[in-house]
Amino acid sequence: MDRRRKLSRSTSGFSVDAGLSLVEHADPSRAYQVRRSLATMGAQQRHGIATEKLEALATSLSSNIHTGLSSRVAAEKLKLDGHNLLQKAEGKGFLRILREQVNGLNTLVTFSAILCLCRGMSIGGIQFGREPDYVNGTIVLAINIFCIFVGAYMEWSCLQLMADVGSMNSLTCNVLRDGKEQNIDVSL
């Protein structure tokens, strides 16, 4: 961490740059003055500046940091923007997962097994070894194919499990509506 960053840390642990970026965005001509005053201010004063910015942000979103959204505004936003839902990911089929398991490493191991099986052959007048190594080539090829299928099955079963768990979970959150704390579904 460079010296400038160390000096810009407040006692609360928040960087002075966070407040400064808000001011620079609002009024770039005052950036130097604000940077200097923020470096000498205490944590209480910086908290006041941050709270002012939060109140302005809440007002711009038709809300209030003390009472939250009104039920009327929440209903309007729901009608305008729709439900807060993530699109479900498209499930992968077993064959697609199996194709993904055939990667560079598995191809290299398969090629080495084929070389073991082809040992002893003559290609273009060049002799490759004395005799074929059918035992080692077959063992390497069988283990590689087994690993590909086991990996594909494990990934497929994990995706199935995640889909089941995802459908069971109903997330809720606490919000302020009309000054009262409520627990609502996150999609609203």
Image (cartoon, rainbow, N blue to C red):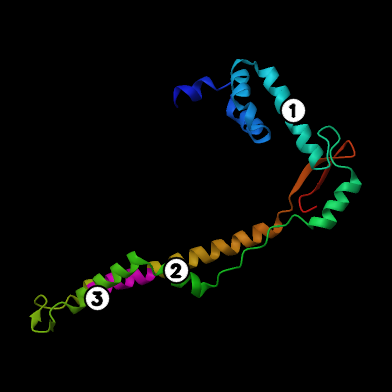
In the rendered image, residue 11, in percent from the top left (x then y), is placed at: 60, 18
Other-residue count near label 1 (Cα within 10 Å), few / some / many at <14 / 14–19 / ≥20: few
- Is 143 one of the magenta-colored residues? yes
Residue 169 as seen in the image, left or right of residue 184: left
- Is 105 one of the magenta-colored residues? no
| Number of numbered discs visible in the structure rendering | 3
Q: Quadrant of the N terminus?
A: top left
Using the numbered discs, state the Cα–Cα distance from disc 2 to disc 3 in whole angstroms.
21 Å
Q: Is there CB contact under 8 Å for labels 1 and 2?
A: no
Q: Which mark is residue 114?
A: 3
In the rendered image, residue 13, in percent from the top left (x then y), is placed at: 58, 24
Q: Is residue 48 visible?
A: yes
Q: Earlier in the sequence, mark 1 or mark 3?
A: 1
Q: Which mark is residue 51?
A: 1
Task: Examine the rendered structure and indicate whether residue 153 appears above or below residue 77.
Answer: below
Q: Secondary structure at mark 3?
A: helix
Other-residue count near label 3 (Cα within 10 Å), few / some / many at <14 / 14–19 / ≥20: some
Using the numbered discs, state the Cα–Cα distance from disc 1 to disc 2 in whole angstroms.
51 Å
Question: Which residue, as the protein is rendered here, is positioned at the far front?
Answer: 29
Q: Earlier in the sequence, mark 2 or mark 3?
A: 2
Q: Secondary structure at mark 2?
A: helix
Q: Earlier in the sequence, mark 1 or mark 2?
A: 1
Q: Secondary structure at mark 1?
A: helix
Q: Quadrant of residue 43?
A: top right
Q: Residue at x 76, y 47 (%)?
A: 172
Residue 21 as seen in the image, left or right of residue 83: left
Q: Residue at x 63, y 62 (%)?
A: 163
Amino acid on which disc 3 is placed: Ile
Mark in the foreground, 1 or 2: 1
Residue beneath disc 2: 100
Q: Which mark is residue 128?
A: none
Magenta-colored span: 137-146
